[in-house]
Image (cartoon, rainbow, N blue to C red):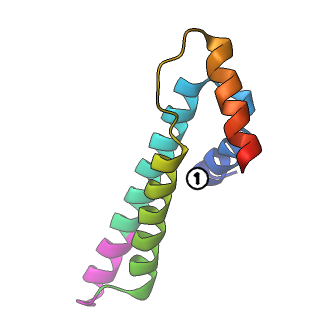
Amino acid sequence: MKAKKALRTALEQPWLYEPEELIKLREKLDELESQGVQELWHRRTNLGFSNKPQELIQEEERRAKLREEKKADEIHGTFESMEDLKSQIGKAQLDL
């Protein structure tokens, strides 16, 4: 399984990971996607294309949407215990 697919699969099961681990997984996925976009752009420019290809534009839009969703998924506030945090996460998942 490729790295990005493995990370996406892991992020589909957030109950298996601690919040810190989820943050690291998301950051690594963002990093790998950014590298992919840069490599695509590098290949396109080396082949002589000066306009941004449609795939790159779509990838940038998808990444922007993911960043917005990531901000929406953040839990804000202070929590007195880990159980309190887990209960808030559970309530957020039920609201979806």
Asked which quadrant contains residue 10, the reply is top right
Q: Residue 58: x and y, percent?
A: 46, 78
Q: Is residue 49 magenta?
A: yes
3, 90: nearer the viewer: 90
Q: Is residue 70 left or right of residue 38?
A: right
Q: Is residue 20 left or right of residue 12?
A: left
Residue extending farthest top = 81
Q: Which residues are magenta?
A: 40-51
Report the residue at 70% width, 24% height from top: 87
Q: Is residue 38 magenta?
A: no
Report the residue at 23% width, 89% height from top: 50
92, 18: nearer the viewer: 92
Q: Is residue 20 left or right of residue 9?
A: left
Q: Residues within 10 Å of mark 1 (few under 14, many from 20)?
A: some
Above or below for 92 versus 80: below
Report the residue at 37% width, 86% height from top: 53
Above or below for 27 versus 81: below
Q: Residue beneath label 1, please?
A: 4
Asked which quadrant contains residue 41, the reply is bottom left
Q: Residue 2: x and y, percent?
A: 63, 52
Q: Amino acid at mark 1?
A: Lys
Number of numbered discs on residues: 1
58, 85: nearer the viewer: 85
Q: Residue 88: x and y, percent?
A: 65, 28
Q: Secondary structure at mark 1?
A: helix
Q: Residue 95: x and y, percent?
A: 72, 46
